[in-house]
Image (tube, rainbow, N blue to C red):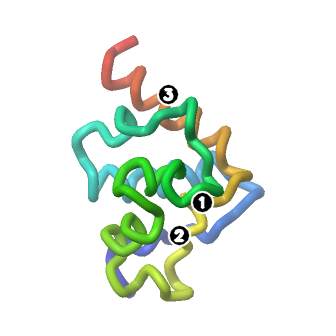
Amino acid sequence: MHPDVIKAALDTQRPAQTVAEAAVLLDRKFPYGWADWVDLDTLDLMSPTRCILGQLFGDWDRGAHLLFGSWASSPEVDVALFADRRFTEEWKAAIQARRRKETGR
């Protein structure tokens, strides 16, 4: 199994934990303030360019392949964590928390 595979499956019963696990992956691959690059006003997890990966890497496909390589299409990798509208509020909360932590506010 690829070392960056997110262990948690897409789990709507524990969305905050699921998003937190996905954010850790972004921390490893995009360590310098990735949360500051996401525009919360335009965030749309159903859009390939306005979702988390789209905003960070240009589009969802490119982001998935940069994060996971050939594993992006593997059933062991749940890239839907970055593109499921049900996780929008959790992503916004996680990003806002990271911004507060980084600025100390």
Q: Are marks 1 and 2 in contact (CB under 8 Å)?
A: yes
Q: Earlier in the sequence, mark 2 or mark 3?
A: 2
- Which residue lies at the image location 43% right of the left edge and 38% below the top edge? 38
Q: Are marks 2 and 3 in contact (CB under 8 Å)?
A: no
Where residue 77 appears, x then y in whole percent?
Answer: 50, 78
Amino acid type at mark 3: Gln
Placement of 43 over or under 9, stated as above or below? above
Placement of 70 over or under 3, stated as above or below? below
SS at circle 1: loop
Q: Residue furthest left?
A: 32
User: How many marks do you count on the picture?
Assistant: 3
**Within 10 Å of the Cα at label 1, are there few (<14), some (14-19), or many (20+) other Cα atoms?**
many
Amino acid type at mark 1: Ala
Q: Are marks 1 and 3 in contact (CB under 8 Å)?
A: no
Residue 96: image tag: 3
In the rendered image, the quadrant that contains the N terminus is bottom left
Residue 16: image tag: none
Placement of 50 over or under 39, stated as above or below? below
- Which residue lies at the image location 45% right of the left edge and 55% below the top edge? 54
Looking at the rendering, which quadrant does residue 61 occupy?
Answer: bottom left
Q: Which numbered mark, 1 or 3, is in the foreground of this view?
A: 1
Q: Is residue 33 left or right of residue 87?
A: left
Q: Earlier in the sequence, mark 1 or mark 3?
A: 1
Where residue 58 appears, x then y in whole percent?
Answer: 37, 56
Nearer to me, 29 or 2: 29
**Within 10 Å of the Cα at label 3, are there few (<14), some (14-19), or many (20+) other Cα atoms?**
some
Q: Which residue is mark 1?
A: 83
- Which residue lies at the image location 22% right of the left edge and 41% below the top edge? 32
